[in-house]
Amino acid sequence: MALPYELLIGLRYTRAKRRNHFISFISMISMLGIGLGVAALIVVLSVMNGFQKELRTRILGVASHIQITAINGELPNWPALAAQAMQHPEVKASAPFVQSQAMFTVDGGVKGSLVRGILPDQEDRVADFRKTIKSGSLDDLRPGEFGVVLGADLARSLHVFTGDKVTLIAPQGTVTPAGVVPRLKSFKVVGIFEVGMFEYDSGLALIHLADAQKLYQLGDNVTGVRLKVDDLFQAPRIARELARFVDADAYLHDWTKSHANFFRAVQIEKNMMFIILSLIVAVAAFNLVSTLVMAVTDKQADIAILRTLGARPLSIMGVFVIQGALVGFIGLGLGVAGGVALALNIDVVVPFIERMLGVHFLSKEVYYISDLPSELLWSDVWGVTLIAFVLALLATLYPSWRASRVNPAEALRYE
């Protein structure tokens, strides 16, 4: 089947012929520019996705997917409430907790902290604290023994290690004839955890649920129940649906609300990087404008001959749109292939570059995440591909329009 002559001529103009070696060289530079811009955009978005996933995993190792908390601070009959929540088909596990403020003091040093009472066996179902334990064990939290597991920065600021004693001061006081006396209790440090998030490492302490109930005089009540769901991204919807299952005066909130500001900041940073790197792709795409303007100037006589043979202005315009689109398409293909390959193998490429240069980009002494994470999302790849191709097409419109406006008489006057 015969191809349209606009396509044949456009394909021919992309190859170097006699006088237009320089124009073809500029076309190649434009092609490589688009490819590098697209590859850089795909790799950076993949790395941003990797960091976002890594941070989300670390946060949700401590926080819960969904949390049910009492309105007045005390949740009675929590086993029945947990059983009601477990009736939802997408809720996988539940665990009770007691949470309140406290102060730790050692040898005159004082540090405020959030104290969370847990049942270690049930807590394993909704969080990953065991993976963060640096010394000691979560199993050493036993009822009546008053053991505590401290965050690494909290332990460091108190200058304590596993096996040391700390004094906990509860904000709720005990009324005596002499006045209100704060409640003090000696705890033994049975473990130290390090999540990698300063919020938790410097301000969270874990004790057994029974010890927390006794310390804060809650009886058999708890502060709330933590839930784990099948798909953490569906947590907002599941939290809304749980209102039909839970028969209690309680708040239901998911992880997207409890850490909304943090994840919103990460998403804004990703969006800004996308915009900034899209401008690099735009600069490379608009290099096609100068390439095609030079091609139009070089092909004045050819355009004039085509016009005298009956070619319409729209056909002339189509020739140069095809030429520019082909350059953009080839550059885009190279960029997508290179970007996807690099994003999928960044865990191999980055260590190789570090060994070659003798440097470490993310030092373990400075950064908790010492390896460059990457998560390739095909939705990002298709978005980058679409934007780059549209920019390349837009770059061809003005030069092609100029070519369609060439006057055959003026072009052939000096030929």
Image (cartoon, grey):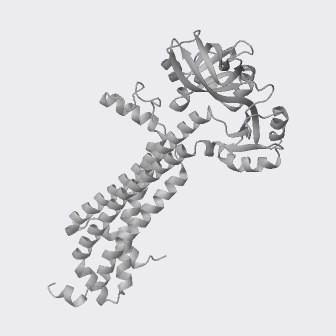
Q: Horizontally, is 83 left or right of 191 in the view?
A: right
Residue 252: x percent and y percent? 72, 44
Please tell me which residue is depicted at 46% across the width and 39% down the height of the picture.
Answer: 345
Instruction: State which quarter of the image contains the C terminus.
Output: bottom left
Q: Is residue 335 left or right of residue 297?
A: right
Q: Can I make out residue 197 in this image?
A: no
Whether residue 147 is visible, yes or no, is yes
- Residue 295, picture quadrant: bottom left
Question: In which image quadrant can residue 282 be found?
Answer: bottom left
Question: Relative to the observer, which residue lies in front, 328 or 20?
Answer: 328
Q: Residue at x 50, y 30 (%)?
A: 198
* 51 or 310, nearer to the observer: 51
For the point 45% across and 50% down, which residue is it?
42
Quarter of the view holding residue 230: top right
Q: Residue furthest top?
A: 163
The image shows residue 28 at horizontal and vertical percentages of 30, 59
From the viewer's side, name the closer residue of 180 and 303. Answer: 180
Report whether 340 appears left or right of 284. right
Residue placed furthest toward the front: 177
Decide: is 399 above or below 123.
below
In the picture provided, is 3 more to the left or to the right than 183?
Answer: left
Question: Foreground: 180 or 117?
Answer: 180
Image coordinates of residue 148 in percent, x first then y, are 64, 17
Could you tell me residue 2's position as x and y percent? 46, 77
Counting the numbered discs, the total is 0
**Position of 68 relative to 386 (above/below):** above
